[in-house]
Image (tube, rainbow, N blue to C red):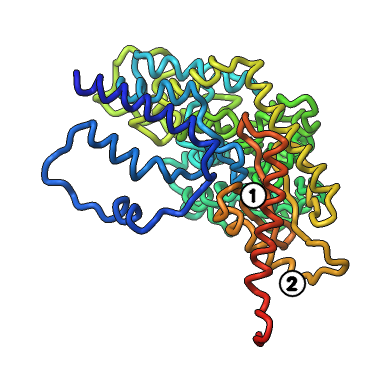
Amino acid sequence: MDDLRRAGRSAAGLAADHLAAVPGGPVWRAVPDADRAWLTEQQLPASGRPLADLLHEIRDHVLPYPMGNGHPRFFGWVNSPPSPAGVLVAPLAAAMNPSCAGGEHAGVLLERTAVRWLAELVGYPHPPGAGLLTSGASMATVIALATARQRVFRQQGLDVRESGLYGQRPLAIYLSAEGHSCLRKAAELLGLGSRHLRTVPVDDAFRMDTAALRRLITADKEAGVRPFFVAASAGTVNTGAVDPLEEVAEIAREHGLWFHIDGAYGAFGILADEADPGYAGLGLADSLVLDPHKWLGVPVDCGCVLFRDPAGARDTFSLVPPYLRDDGSDELGWFAEYGPEQTRPFRALRVWATIAHLGHEGVGRLVRRGTELARTLAAMVDAADDFELLAPAVTSVVAFRFRGRSAAPDPSRAEALNERIPAAVQHRGRAFLTGTRLAGTAALRACILHPDTTEADLAVLLHEIRLAAAEITASETPAPGTTS
């Protein structure tokens, strides 16, 4: 234990030093060949090394090459910096190392509170037991879709767990064109098939077109396909758009569909001062997915699925082998009865610590800061003659394009340039953003989640995009006296 105590102090100092140095270093940098070889080509050691030596190797070969999401000028994907409280308690959860499948111990009991707090933050109704922490939104979506699948067959007097899907009438799933790909993966995994996944068009603000949704449902009914599940977004990854949740909920009620909301990234946007009015229907969903490891900064991995009724998930997943019976747990049973994981890590400690450290007010400030900066960046883009805003900034994502200052830009040239800009900006190291496609064209997107990002950082981002575009253009321009 003395070695662990000494190494633990060193590890804590190493973590603190790393986090303190991140803002002054590059956002991202490529891994040199020597360190790449160390990371990927090590031989299995014949004998072990002291803990102190491991820390030295991590310091020299691992910490210098982060993904970049700890930096205030990281605007890529939907990845936040780690919350200080989450970093602090992660080793303690590892030291306890429980399986949070169930039973009477702190990890299980604290998860009840962590899940309830998440539901309270976004105003979602939460009967006891109606939610659990997951590895992320992808697994949470699998759990929600499996629960909806079980319900629709129960309504027909069938238990799909026993009978499977053999010979059953096709079931249709409805997802916005801007919806997340995890639902397609879940449909394929659960045997529902992507063939019956309907893509609902979006409006000019990239929100689900509810009139189109109605038409698709009607067409499926006429074709003998049973509509059963509609997924709306409370903050898409491409633009941060919030679908008209109340309207989607009404359509779901009319046709007996399971109403699911993907709020993995954006559901916490309901706490912003000028929250999108579409959030008004959030509490109407049969299931809601959240990712504490996104906007809240809980260290990865940590997702959450919430249900209006806990009985459905338990009916879908409960399978208690003899060696786990009579354990003395309460009437809610084990968490393992509500999802596919049996051995489950102690995720709740990181969630609890992050929210307890921030408080409701602190979470609200974090969200408001992100949405305010997004509106600021959108205004900067709108005011510039070489950028074009592509969608309203309703959460903390800004989607835009670089168009240059040409009076008549070549569309194909602009397309190619916007496709190449993200990688060029990343390699320059002073900012990090990613690209996507909107309405069939290349787009740039910046997601603002770091609590220490400033307006000056936004100006650096736009400047870096301009410099990257200039470098790309220069690299493609033939030198004087040469031919292309």
**Residue 440 to residue 388: above or below:** below
Q: Could you tell me which residue is drawn at 68 percent across and 22 percent down?
A: 365
Task: Tell me which amino acid carries mark 1.
Answer: Arg
Task: Tell me which amino acid carries mark 2.
Answer: Ser
Which numbered disc, 1 or 2, marks the residue that appears first in the sequence? 1
Q: Tell me: 194 left or right of 134.
A: right
Which numbered circle lies on residue 412?
2
Instruction: Give the secondary structure at mark 1.
Output: strand
**The N terminus lies in quadrant:** top left
Image position, residue 445 (x, y; %): 68, 49
Q: Name the residue under label 1.
A: 226
Image position, residue 147 (x, y; %): 52, 36
In the picture, residue 48 is in which quadrant?
Answer: top left
Residue 157 seen anywhere in this rendered image of the structure: no
In the picture, residue 396 is in which quadrant?
Answer: top right
Label 1 to label 2, Cα distance in Å?
A: 42 Å
Mark 1 surroundings: few (<14), some (14-19) or many (≥20) residues within 10 A: many
Image position, residue 12 (x, y; %): 37, 24
Between disc 1 and disc 2, the foreground one is 2
Q: Tell me: 342 left or right of 301.
A: left
Q: Could you tell me which residue is drawn at 65 percent across and 86 percent down?
A: 482
Instruction: Give the secondary structure at mark 2.
Output: helix
Image position, residue 232 (x, y; %): 68, 41
Among all residues in the image, which is located at the extreme front?
481
Q: Tell me: 111 left or right of 42.
A: right
Among all residues in the image, which is located at the extreme left?
46
Q: Could you tell me which residue is drawn at 19 percent across and 18 percent down?
A: 2
Q: Could you tell me which residue is drawn at 27 percent across and 56 percent down?
A: 41
Q: Nearer the viewer, residue 232 or 196?
A: 232
Which numbered circle lies on residue 421?
none
